[in-house]
């Protein structure tokens, strides 16, 4: 079993991005600038966004955080998006999800200019990605592809089972793994909460991507010997043995699953760190106008 080390890879990728940014700077080019809009203080969003902003600073990129209270109106939020769209100094924009119930996330995603949508959530980017055209690809799926590539994991002809059909991870992941490219060329099964015989289907996976958001849901009996297991989950569970009172768990029961696998991602220290790298890579692409000329 080989651990897919997100910590190691993300450190390498950050170094590569820092070199790119230094080069842009040396040539008098535009320093990539990522803007994040954060609404409220609930859940883990604040910590995620802080980590994104900090990573940008570490590689020499510019970052701006725009904050709103939970009771911000949809109109005010959309106006803020429009301001960023119109600001030529700002290259990439993310609006951290989830948003409060009174705001329609689809409306907000669609308001982001596709050429600044470095999260790849705009329907135009999702459509372009699905067609294999240049597009911003959602950060977590892109980070997983990068991981498979850098560990030289073979994917052609393999059966890839994706568990979870979220717009952010499961759905784009399933599309990317079937495309005629590397990593890709898999036979893909996209499973979800209404899937019957889920355990049986998972047992046929050469590559199992768990992105359903249920701690330790994937157990050893659901995994084929020699499978590659990618764990996208990251949830807090109560753990009295920890000083903080909680532990971070993935969607995979790591201790019992890991010995059966050829490759597996740890949680934390796996996919999560790759996600931030993808976001920064997309922002560099945005500053260089690589996707939309
Ligand atoms: N919430 C959870 N993951 C993400 C992400 O990748 N981007 C945004 N904008 N919100 C999220």
Image: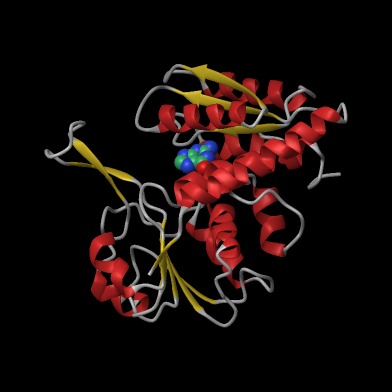
214 versus 293 height, above or below? below
* Closest to the observer, 194 or 88: 88
- What residue is drawn where x is 49% and y is 17%? 68
Q: Position of residue 124 (x, y in %)?
A: 70, 49
Q: Is residue 238 left or right of residue 117?
A: left
Q: Look at 37% across and 47% down and name the residue there.
A: 268
Identify which residue is drawn at 64% across, 51% down.
137
Residue 90 placement: quadrant: top right
On the question of residue 119 being in view, the answer is no
Q: Position of residue 48 (x, y in %)?
A: 45, 33
Tell whether 148 sits left or right of 192: right
Residue 154 placed where, x, y %?
57, 75
Considering depth in this image, is 292 or 206 the residue closer to the camera? Answer: 206
Q: Position of residue 223 (x, y in %)?
A: 32, 74
Q: Is residue 39 left or right of residue 253?
A: right
Q: Quadrant of the C terminus?
A: top right
Which of the two residues, 211 or 51, is positioned nearer the viewer here?
A: 51
């Amino acid at each position: 079993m080989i651990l897919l080390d997100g910590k190691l890879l993300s450190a390498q990728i950050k170094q590569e991005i820092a070199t790119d940014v230094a080069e842009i700077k040396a040539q008098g080019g535009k320093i990539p600038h990522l803007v994040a809009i954060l609404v409220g203080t609930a859940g883990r969003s604040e910590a995620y966004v802080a980590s994104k902003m900090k990573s940008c600073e570490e590689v020499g990129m510019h970052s701006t955080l725009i904050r709103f209270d939970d009771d911000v109106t949809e109109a005010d939020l959309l106006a803020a998006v429009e301001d960023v769209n119109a600001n030529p100094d700002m290259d990439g924009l993310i609006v951290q999800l989830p948003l409060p119930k009174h705001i329609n996330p689809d409306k907000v995603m669609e308001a982001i200019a596709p050429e600044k949508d470095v999260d790849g959530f705009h329907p135009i980017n999702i459509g372009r990605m699905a067609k294999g055209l240049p597009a911003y690809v959602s950060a977590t799926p892109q980070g997983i592809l990068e991981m498979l590539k850098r560990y030289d994991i073979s994917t052609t002809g393999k059966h890839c089972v994706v568990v979870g059909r979220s717009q952010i991870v499961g759905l784009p992941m399933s599309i990317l793994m079937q495309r005629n490219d590397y990593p890709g060329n898999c036979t893909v099964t996209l499973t979800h909460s209404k899937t019957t015989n889920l355990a049986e289907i998972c047992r046929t996976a050469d590559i199992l991507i768990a992105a359903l958001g249920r701690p330790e849901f994937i157990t050893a009996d659901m995994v084929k010997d020699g499978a590659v297991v990618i764990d996208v989950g990251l949830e807090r569970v109560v753990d009295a043995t920890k000083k903080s009172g909680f532990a971070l768990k993935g969607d995979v029961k790591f201790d019992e699953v890991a010995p059966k696998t050829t490759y597996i991602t740890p949680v934390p220290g796996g996919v999560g760190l790759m996600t931030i790298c993808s976001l920064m890579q997309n922002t560099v692409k945005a500053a260089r106008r690589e996707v939309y000329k």
